[in-house]
Image (cartoon, rainbow, N blue to C red):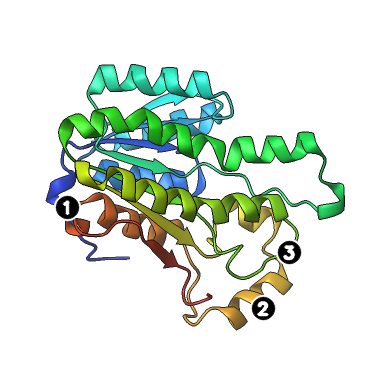
Amino acid sequence: MNQLARYGSLQDKRVFITGGGSGIGEELVAAFVAQGAIVAFVDIAREASQALCDRLAAAGLRAPLFRYCDITDIPALQKVMSGLAAEIGDFDVLVNNAANDQRHQTDEVTLDYWNERIAINQRPMFFTCQSVLPGMKRKGSGSIINISSISWHIKGAGYPVYATAKAAVVGLTRGLAREVGAHGIRVNTVTPGWVMTQRQIDLWVDEAAEAEIKKSQCLPDKLMPAHIASMVLFLAADDGAMCTAQEFIVDAGWV
């Protein structure tokens, strides 16, 4: 992908990303760093996250700040976020990216499993938003981008708790957008299609999946993490100044 946009308004902006160590999150971290932003991210994958930081620094870019954090531990997540804000300044951009699409069947879901899935895929989004809002209000501006999934749009089976959590992202986005818009804070959802991360390729992209992708997408090319990052960058930048409370679907025309 060549000739992509350069967003001057992202220079030196403070950006916080959840799940930034691999997959879509890794691409998001790299994309914001390339735009000149000051990036901080959390993940539970220590080695991959540190390798990302080292790789970006070796390329002559400003290394992102990585902090190990299990986002299901909300007090720990809040502590990390407040510590980073104290170190680099209040955040201008929040990207709620972290998620886990582990497969499961409805009749197998226990209360404990439900709570665990929600604790990963839904609960942290609210509390990261809560954590950045005071700083954004002080600035009088900010952009929050919540990552959903087309899974619930396409009525995908095999992950009902995940689909529930990802549908709830849109509700959180729209409710918060109304609440914080008067402070100049924008809140949007980016909804990816089937993105070819290494995890997806390793676990689920077999011959049948390839056929489904070919049949369902309008565009023939594979959907890659960089395609999602391009939409997120636009919404984070001043170019997306009047976009809020919306869901932006990036799925090559599947939905």
Q: Residues within 10 Å of mark 2 (few under 14, many from 20)?
A: few
Relative depth, front residue between 37 and 81: 81
Q: Which amino acid does the dot numbered 2 rest on? A: Ala
Q: Going by the image, does 2 lie left or right of 147?
A: left
**Residue 14, picture quadrant:** top left
> Cα distance, mark 1 to mark 2?
39 Å
Q: Going by the image, does 219 lie left or right of 150?
A: left
Say the numbered circle drawn on residue 5: none
First-in-chain label (1 vs 2): 2
First-in-chain label (3 vs 2): 3
Q: Is residue 42 visible?
A: yes
Q: Is residue 252 above or below residue 179?
A: below
Q: Nearer the viewer, mark 3 or mark 2?
A: 3
Say which residue label 1 marks. Answer: 238
Q: Residues within 10 Å of mark 3 (few under 14, many from 20)?
A: few
Relative depth, front residue between 137 and 37: 137
> Where the N terminus falls, by quadrant?
bottom left
Say which residue label 2 marks. Answer: 211
> Cα distance, mark 3 to mark 2?
17 Å
**Residue 93, picture quadrant:** top left
Q: Which amino acid does the dot numbered 1 rest on? A: Asp
Q: Is residue 19 visible?
A: no
Q: Are marks 3 and 2 in contact (CB under 8 Å)?
A: no
Image position, residue 138 (x, y; %): 18, 29
Relative depth, front residue between 239 and 21: 239
Say which residue label 3 marks. Answer: 157
Q: Nearer the viewer, mark 1 or mark 2?
A: 1
Secondary structure beneath disc 3? loop
Q: Which amino acid does the dot numbered 3 rest on? A: Ala
Relative depth, front residue between 110 and 222: 110
Q: Are marks 1 and 3 in contact (CB under 8 Å)?
A: no
